[in-house]
């Protein structure tokens, strides 16, 4: 389990992929993105009302979700954060072998609770291998907040949902305002 490093988080994403996603959108959807980007740019400080753009690729449906409602709209998978699994990773980080860590967890939580936590975690990973995890959700909020608290370039988060029934992961893109500029076709 990665611990916070204390440095400011940097939004990740691939510009080429974001460009192709934006190119596939309708003019109305691109206009919505420009409006949401303007909200982010104009924000005086961090607020839960800031937009997260969510794209359902199967239906090419784009919607605005306030960051404060993102966890309830798209609940993150927290199965990896079960206390039993967190404690197991902690023991491993302290240098214990996997067998020693497992034995200590069984002593602390009981073998049944440990097995159930592990089973839930693996079932979730099998059902949704590209899951929207708690860590990915927290990373989005941390990066978003950091760019509004600091002098960083303000970017709009675009969450591209994986296609249902596939192994496609949800992907997070951070859109720059320049990617959303209109093309001029003046002759």
Image (cartoon, helix red, strand yellow):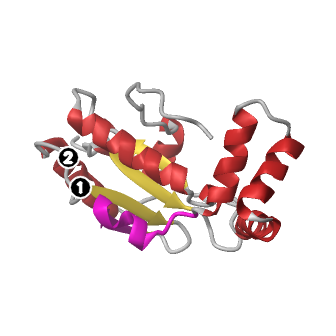
User: In front: 51, or 138?
Assistant: 138
Residue 72 inside the magenta-drawn segment: yes
Name the residue: 76% across, 63% down. Answer: 114
* Other residues around mark 2 within 10 Å, as few (<14) / some (14–19) / many (≥20): some
Look at the image and tell me in which quarter the N terminus lies.
top right
The x, y position of residue 33, in whole percent, is 29, 55
Which corner quadrant of the image does residue 123 belong to? Answer: bottom right
User: In front: 110, or 85?
Assistant: 110
Q: CA distance from mark 2 to mark 1?
A: 8 Å
The x, y position of residue 36, in whole percent, is 24, 55
The x, y position of residue 105, in whole percent, is 75, 54
* Tag 2–tag 1 contact (CB < 8 Å): yes
The image's mark for residue 25 is none
Name the residue: 70% across, 33% down. Answer: 93
Q: Is residue 61 left or right of residue 154?
A: right
Name the residue: 50% across, 58% down. Answer: 160
Residue 104 inside the magenta-drawn segment: no
The magenta span reads 62-77
Q: Is residue 7 above or below residue 37?
A: above
User: In front: 1, or 108?
Assistant: 108
* Other residues around mark 1 within 10 Å, as few (<14) / some (14–19) / many (≥20): many
Name the residue: 53% across, 66% down. Answer: 57
Q: Secondary structure at mark 2?
A: loop
Q: Label 1 belongs to which residue? A: 50
Most distant residue in the right direction = 99
User: In front: 144, or 113?
Assistant: 113
Q: Label 2 belongs to which residue? A: 46
Q: Is residue 153 visible from the viewing direction of this image?
A: yes
Q: Is residue 26 above or below residue 146?
A: below
The x, y position of residue 61, in whole percent, is 43, 71
Which corner quadrant of the image does residue 28 belong to? Answer: bottom left
Q: Secondary structure at mark 1?
A: loop
């Amino acid at each position: 389990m990665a611990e916070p490093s204390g440095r400011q988080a940097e939004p990740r994403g691939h510009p080429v992929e974001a460009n192709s996603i934006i190119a596939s959108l309708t003019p109305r959807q691109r206009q919505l993105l420009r409006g949401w980007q303007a909200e982010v740019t104009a924000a005086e400080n961090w607020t839960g009302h800031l937009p997260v753009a969510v794209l359902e690729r199967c239906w090419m449906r784009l919607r605005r979700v306030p960051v404060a409602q993102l966890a309830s709209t798209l609940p993150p998978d927290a199965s990896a954060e079960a206390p039993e699994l967190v404690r197991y990773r902690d023991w491993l980080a302290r240098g214990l072998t996997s067998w020693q860590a497992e034995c200590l967890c069984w002593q602390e939580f009981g073998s049944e609770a440990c097995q159930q936590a592990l089973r839930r975690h693996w079932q979730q990973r099998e059902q949704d291998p590209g899951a929207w995890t708690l860590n990915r959700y927290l990373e989005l909020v941390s990066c978003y907040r950091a760019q509004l608290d600091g002098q960083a370039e303000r970017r709009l988060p675009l969450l591209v949902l994986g296609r249902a029934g596939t192994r496609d992961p949800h992907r997070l893109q951070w859109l720059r305002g320049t990617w959303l500029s209109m093309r001029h076709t003046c002759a």
